[in-house]
Amino acid sequence: MYFATAQGMRPAPLTHNPFNALVMPRPIAWISTLDANGVANLAPYSYFNAVCADPPYVMFAPNSAVPGQTKDTCRNLADVPEFVVSLVSEDDGVLMNATSKAYPPGVDEFAACGVARLPGELVRPPRVASAKAALECRVFQIVDLPLSADGRLNRVVIGAVVGIYVADDLIDANGIIDERKLKPLARLGYMNYGTLGEVFAMGRPL
Ligand SMILES: Cc1cc2nc3c(=O)[nH]c(=O)nc-3n(C[C@H](O)[C@H](O)[C@H](O)COP(=O)(O)O)c2cc1C
């Protein structure tokens, strides 16, 4: 089939928006922020990726669940424009999913979900203690995208990575990150997740 997106995202025979099931696997950013009172928020975002390696920049895309409302993560960034991306490993999948619940503003989601934290080095929000890697970020730019068909906000947050935590045991004797030890959890379509399958190297053409 082929469809023009202007005609809507569920043309027959599709029963759900297929976009998440096509643009995948996606890494999951477990994003911590602070509100104006210093209360920590934590939520997963899989519309997330690296956009530049040197200098390092990342993006993630919070939408709003309800027209006119903003997610806590996004609201917090207006007060404290810093965030930490804790990278989600397989072992943290259940806890990560628990933090996707829509808690009211002002709830410490680390405490509410029983997630241990460690303080940031160069930014104020904490990172997830069990994460094997984390990126400390300062907001570089927030871009407003067009509203969804039902009026929900869509934003892209671009962050400059100012500090990187890597668990020492991820680094092998040659100074290479061992992705097997990171055990990244990937977001697929619908409610599906995946883990790292076969890993192989392929050199670039000369
Ligand atoms: C694996 C996973 C990935 C998610 N990715 C996104 C995303 O990219 N953008 C988004 O707006 N919400 C995403 N969500 C939903 C948010 O995590 C959820 O709305 C959460 O309550 C937002 O929290 P906050 O209001 O504390 O920021 C995702 C949820 C899960 C479980």
Image (cartoon, grey):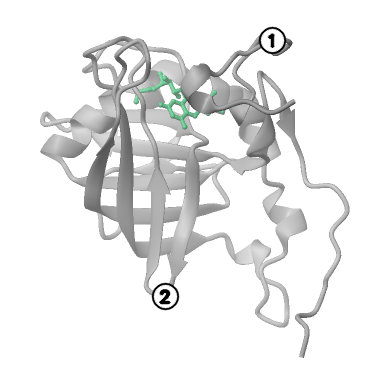
Q: Residue at x 11, y 31 (%)?
A: 36
Q: Secondary structure at mark 1?
A: loop
Instruction: Kindly identify the amino acid type of the residue bearing the numbered disc 2.
Output: Asp
Q: Give the Cα separation between the discs numbered 2 and 1.
A: 44 Å
Which residue corresponds to mark 1? 12
Query: Horizontal placement of 134 versus 185: left or right?
Result: left
- Measured as percent of width and height from the top left, residue 28 is found at 55, 39
Residue 72, visible in the rendered structure: yes
Which residue corresponds to mark 2? 54
Q: Secondary structure at mark 2?
A: loop
Q: Is residue 165 above or below residue 7?
A: below
Query: Horizontal placement of 25 versus 77: left or right?
Result: right
| Front one among 196 and 145 | 145
Residue 187, visible in the rendered structure: no
Query: Horizontal placement of 178 versus 94: left or right?
Result: right
- Look at the image and tell me in which quarter the C terminus lies: bottom right
Query: Horizontal placement of 191 versus 206: left or right?
Result: left
- Measured as percent of width and height from the top left, residue 198 is found at 88, 53
